[in-house]
Amino acid sequence: MSEVKTNKISSLASNNDITIDPDGTGLFLPNRTPTFFAELSSDQTISDATETVVQFNSEDFDIGSIWDTSNYRLTVDADTVGYYFMSCFIFTSGSANIEDQYIRLRKNGSVYIENKNQAVVQSAAVSTTDATHSFGAVIPLLSSGDYADVTLFSDRSGGGTVVVNQISTSRTRTYLSGFRMGGA
């Protein structure tokens, strides 16, 4: 067994990543782990019975520039491909009763996971107009150009609309966050 003692290891790569590959296992030490936290800048109204991309158009942070606030998706390139842990919480309200409601985490436009609504308890009674959704999942984004986004589908009785609720700029009620757990 050999031992290396040093005070500093510097990378020659343009992105400052370091790969140690003694036996093909490829221990990868990224300079900065791609990570983001996105939220709504205001409430978003969604039409009845229509799958709609949730517009996470504001960022608290975005290390690696992986979140796009114009198309509301995480997109990877050759330097950021890998396995991503993503977590999401969505609060919805509406004027009509919920018949069916779910959120989807999509990979390249196809459903990766789906989560049905959870009723909200208000004043010791279950609401039939408000719901929350949440998920935590690992999604493989292994090719440059792969992307992930979140959609909401809500079918309301009588054709009512649903509001994805941000509530105010001082409190975040609807958000999406993610970070790369490991490279491809």
Image (cartoon, rainbow, N blue to C red):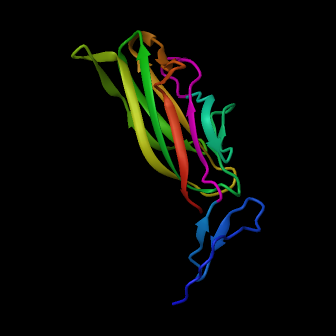
Q: Which of the 4 image quadrants contains residue 53? A: top right
| Highlighted range, magenta | 31-53
Residue drawn where x is 59% and y is 61% of the image: 183
Q: Quadrant of the C terminus?
A: bottom right
Answer with left or right where residue 77 lies relative to residue 131. Answer: right
Location of residue 165 in the rendering, given as x and y in whole percent from the top left corner: 48, 19
Q: Is residue 40 magenta?
A: yes
Q: How many marks?
A: 0
Residue 1 in the image: above or below residue 80 = below
Location of residue 110 in the rendering, given as x and y in whole percent from the top left corner: 55, 43
Residue drawn where x is 78% and y is 61% of the image: 14
Residue 6 in the image: above or below residue 103 = below
Residue 111 in the image: above or below residue 51 = below
Q: 121 or 117, which is in the foreground?
A: 121
Residue 40 in the image: above or below residue 168 = below
Q: Which of the 4 image quadrants contains residue 142? A: bottom right
Answer with left or right where residue 122 lies relative to residue 141. Answer: left
Location of residue 123 in the rendering, given as x and y in whole percent from the top left corner: 24, 13
Location of residue 51 in the rendering, given as x and y in whole percent from the top left corner: 53, 28
Residue drawn where x is 63% and y is 41% of the image: 62
Q: Which of the 4 image quadrants contains residue 31? A: bottom right
